[in-house]
Image (tube, grey):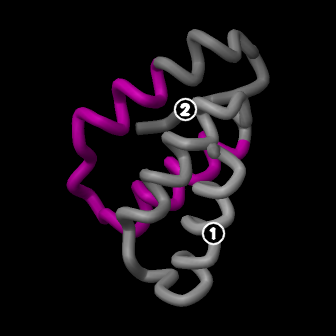
């Protein structure tokens, strides 16, 4: 199911790249699918599309990714 959802969000992004919600949804789905680096990348994309208004959801999701992935080579800048 996650693979299908990922493909759908990626397709939405190709059609409407300036819309921020699919980036967040894609990152969340990738997190659940164990694709941590991709999830971080898409959270960054979401943050860029969202502008300076960064939500608490990004912070919580980023922490979940960092805690689960436990990698020192990933830096999350919020």
Give the main secondary structure of the magenta stretch. Answer: helix
**Residue placed at 54% from the left, 53% from the top?**
26
Q: Quadrant of the N terminus?
A: top right
- Residue 7 image point, x, y percent: 67, 64
Look at the image and give the residue range highlighted in magenta: 38-63
Q: Which residue is mark 1?
A: 10
Q: Which residue is mark 2?
A: 76
Decide which of 21, 66 is in the foreground and name it.
Answer: 21
Report the label total.
2
Q: Secondary structure at mark 2?
A: loop
Decide which of 38, 75 is in the foreground and name it.
Answer: 38
Counting other residues with Cα less than 10 Å from the Cα at mark 1, is it few (<14), some (14-19), or many (20 or more)? some
**Residue placed at 59% from the left, 68% from the top?**
8
Counting other residues with Cα less than 10 Å from the Cα at mark 2, is it few (<14), some (14-19), or many (20 or more)? some
Q: Is residue 7 above or below residue 1?
A: below
- Residue 2 image point, x, y percent: 64, 44
- Tell me which corner region of the image, top left, top right, bottom left or bottom right, holds residue 31: top right
In this rendering, position of residue 46 left or right of residue 33: left
Q: Who comes first in sequence, dot 1 or dot 2?
A: 1
- Residue 5 image point, x, y percent: 58, 56
**Residue placed at 38% from the left, 67% from the top?**
20
Q: Quadrant of the C terminus?
A: top left
Q: Secondary structure at mark 1?
A: helix
**Magenta span has 62?**
yes
- Tell me which corner region of the image, top left, top right, bottom left or bottom right, holds residue 67: top right
- Residue 25 image point, x, y percent: 45, 52
**Magenta span has 57?**
yes
**Residue placed at 63% from the left, 29% from the top?**
75
């Amino acid at each position: 199911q996650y693979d299908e959802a990922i493909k759908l969000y990626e397709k939405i992004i190709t059609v409407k790249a300036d819309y921020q919600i699919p980036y967040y949804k894609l990152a969340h789905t990738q997190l659940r699918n164990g694709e941590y680096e991709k999830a971080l990348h898409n959270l960054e994309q979401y943050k860029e599309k969202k502008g300076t208004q960064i939500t608490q959801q990004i912070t919580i999701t980023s922490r979940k990714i960092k805690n689960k992935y436990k990698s020192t080579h990933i830096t999350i800048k919020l």
